[in-house]
Image (tube, coloured by chain):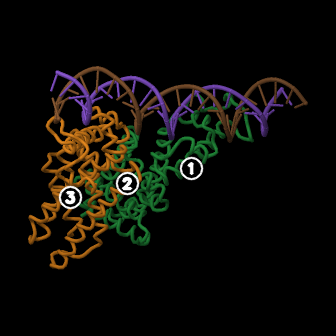
Chain colours: A green, B orange, C brown, D purple
Amino acid sequence: MSTMSTGAEATGRSYAGRSPDERDAQRRARLLAAAREIIGTQGYAATTIPGVCAAAKVSTRHFYRLYGTKEDLFVDLYDQVTAESYTRVTASLTETTGRHIRERIPAAMLAYLKPMVEDARVARIAFVEIMGASPRIEQLRLDYRETLIGLVRHEGQEAVARGEIADRDWRFASLALVGAATAIVYDWMLRTERPEVDELEAAMAELALTLLTR
Amino acid sequence: MSTMSTGAEATGRSYAGRSPDERDAQRRARLLAAAREIIGTQGYAATTIPGVCAAAKVSTRHFYRLYGTKEDLFVDLYDQVTAESYTRVTASLTETTGRHIRERIPAAMLAYLKPMVEDARVARIAFVEIMGASPRIEQLRLDYRETLIGLVRHEGQEAVARGEIADRDWRFASLALVGAATAIVYDWMLRTERPEVDELEAAMAELALTLLTR
DNA sequence: TCGATCTGAAAATTGCACTTGCCGGTTTCG
DNA sequence: CGAAACCGGCAAGTGCAATTTTCAGATCGA
């Protein structure tokens, strides 16, 4: 990346009113959108590169210049999807800085769930398709979860230091919360007769409080 | 099946001191053992039929007579693996019949975890490889989980009727418990510096009590 | 306008695993 | 003992998706 960051005398020329970098960025965006749709509805295993390319209106030639393999595309997609959640959580925690941990946890929980509750495809990607897809992707999932655990532990220990709650095994509590959220939200997505979003969110907030503060 | 159930004048003859049915049963058992080993260590996606056959000392020809596809074999394996847990749980509940629900839950939880804690391959199969492998297998997983939810709900409601605990959304509680158990036990398997089994089991029993009775 | 560059579509190639069929050797049983 | 049934291993043949290459047309820039 560093070598082309100045980007001025790049190798290509403009086309359709776009610079080479812009064109690539648009192709990338279309591929990611198509991948989100197809992987999020058909599943990773059933997804083919030509299929994604056709949906994205990108030729396979360009695909292979942007991504080496289907796995690379999925990694990019997963980064995008997890970044949505992670960004919202950290934003929520920043907003609630200084408040009691029992107020902050429900807000952060809802921020975490937001992208999945809004879009079933995201839930499927983040909760189901991510698992066991490949060793590299599995590692990505574990790394991301470790980041989340670190975040929970950090906030938790500060709350303990402030005397707001009792200390506990934060890794255990974080894993329980993430695992429970995964199962519950995905089940909620799949059901036809499901409770309102509000009810789900209230129950999840309550669960987070139970696991992290009681 | 029904046409050959009497089995007397079946097409084949004895070999190596075994009847045709016995030989098939042994091949099946060897294939399942090999599949457990390979899928449980390399993953479902990386598993090939010739690979399983070689490990099981079964020719591919015989494989295709016993199972049509890799998926069929995996279904059989998953049935076996889940049956282990399910059988232990129901046995535990039978043993503790009449006791207070707060005593029965920890016992049932440990029974459920036993096969996974004893064998990392089983944990990987039941918790990771089962997910997103194929639509049919995903359905199998959901069906099995539904059975488990029904079991928890049944026992839970009876305890409520006996006045031992307060009523609650049993589907929510079951999913939370199963999801949390999945995440925690698999994490425990993967870690190098992990707590003793006893500590894990105690924490899981405590978690089950929290989610189902508090 | 003209040659160079870039495009998407589609054909051609490659690679991998499934699936089938054959083979030399073993066991059965008349 | 010898023909027949059966075995596991192995060598094609097949099918599908990944990957590479080709190509005719569109766009750019001098």
Three-letter code, disc 2:
Glu
Query: The N terminus of chain B lies in which quarter of the figure?
Result: bottom left
Which residue is identified by label 2? B138
Name the subunit of mark 3: B
x, y percentage for residue A205?
A: 35, 65
Of residues B164 and C28, the one nearer the viewer is C28
Name the mark nearer the viewer: 3 or 1.
3
Query: In this picture, is A138 found above or below B178?
Result: above
Query: The C terminus of chain B lies in which quarter of the figure?
Result: bottom left
Which residue is identified by label 1? A33
The answer, for residue A15, to whether it is visible in the render is: yes
Tags 2 and 3 both on a single chain = yes
x, y percentage for residue B66?
A: 30, 44
Name the subunit of mark 2: B
Secondary structure beneath dot 1 equals helix
Residue B64 picture quarter: top left
In the image, A165: left or right of A40? left
Q: Residues within 10 Å of mark 3 (few under 14, many from 20)?
A: some
Three-letter code, disc 3:
Tyr
Q: CA distance from mark 3 to mark 1?
A: 41 Å
Comes first in the chain, label 2 or label 3: 3
Which residue is identified by label 3? B86
Residue A124 picture quarter: bottom left
Q: Residues within 10 Å of mark 2 (few under 14, many from 20)?
A: some
Name the subunit of mark 1: A
Q: Please say if the residues under marks 1 and 2 sit with CB atoms less than 8 Å apart.
A: no
Three-letter code, disc 1:
Ala
x, y percentage for residue B183?
A: 29, 51
Looking at the image, how many numbered discs can be counted on the residues?
A: 3
Residue at image x 44%, y 59%? A95
